[in-house]
Amino acid sequence: MGGRRNGEGGVNWASFGDFLAMGGYGFYVWGAYAVTFLGLAAEIILLRRRRRAALESVARYHRNPHETAP
């Protein structure tokens, strides 16, 4: 049960090009990976910017605690 016997089951490609084509669905598969990667990269960049802005705000407050926040 569940095991491979004599090369049955599993996914096999004849070439790297066949692997990239994914049986005709390569555009959708690799496109989904690209969109996910770009979304994660954008999130990391935006989080770093927000963190930096928050730390600068705290530092500004500690330098002049009587100044009102923007």
Image (cartoon, helix red, strand yellow):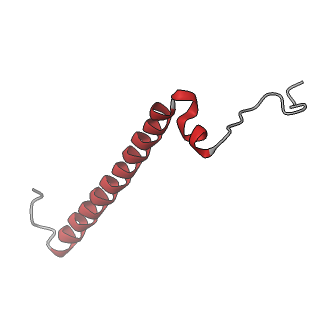
- The correct choice, above or below, for 30 with respect to 49 in the image is above
Q: Residue at (33%, 59%) from the top-left corner?
A: 48
- Residue at x 28% of width, y 65% of height: 55
Which quarter shows the N terminus? top right
Identified at 33% across, 50% down, the residue is 42
Nearest the eye: 38 or 63: 38
Which is more toward the observer, 47 or 5? 5
The answer to which of 33 and 52 lies nearer the viewer is 33
Which residue is farthest bottom?
63
Q: How many marks?
A: 0
| Image quarter of the C terminus | bottom left
Above or below, 66 relative to 22: below
In this rendering, is residue 66 above or below 41? below
Q: Quadrant of residue 65?
A: bottom left
Quadrant for residue 20, please give it.
Answer: top right
x and y percentages locating residue 17 in the rendered image = 57, 42
Q: Determine the residue located farthest toward the top in the rendered image.
A: 1
Which residue occupies the foreground of this view, 53 or 37? 37
Q: Is residue 33 left or right of residue 70?
A: right
Give above or below for 24 relative to 33: above
Where does the image place residue 14, in percent across and percent down from the top left?
68, 39
Q: Residue at x 43, y 46 (%)?
A: 37
Q: Position of residue 34 (x, y in %)?
A: 42, 43
| The quadrant where residue 67 appears | bottom left
| Side (left or right) of 47 relative to 11 | left
Q: Is residue 66 left or right of residue 46?
A: left
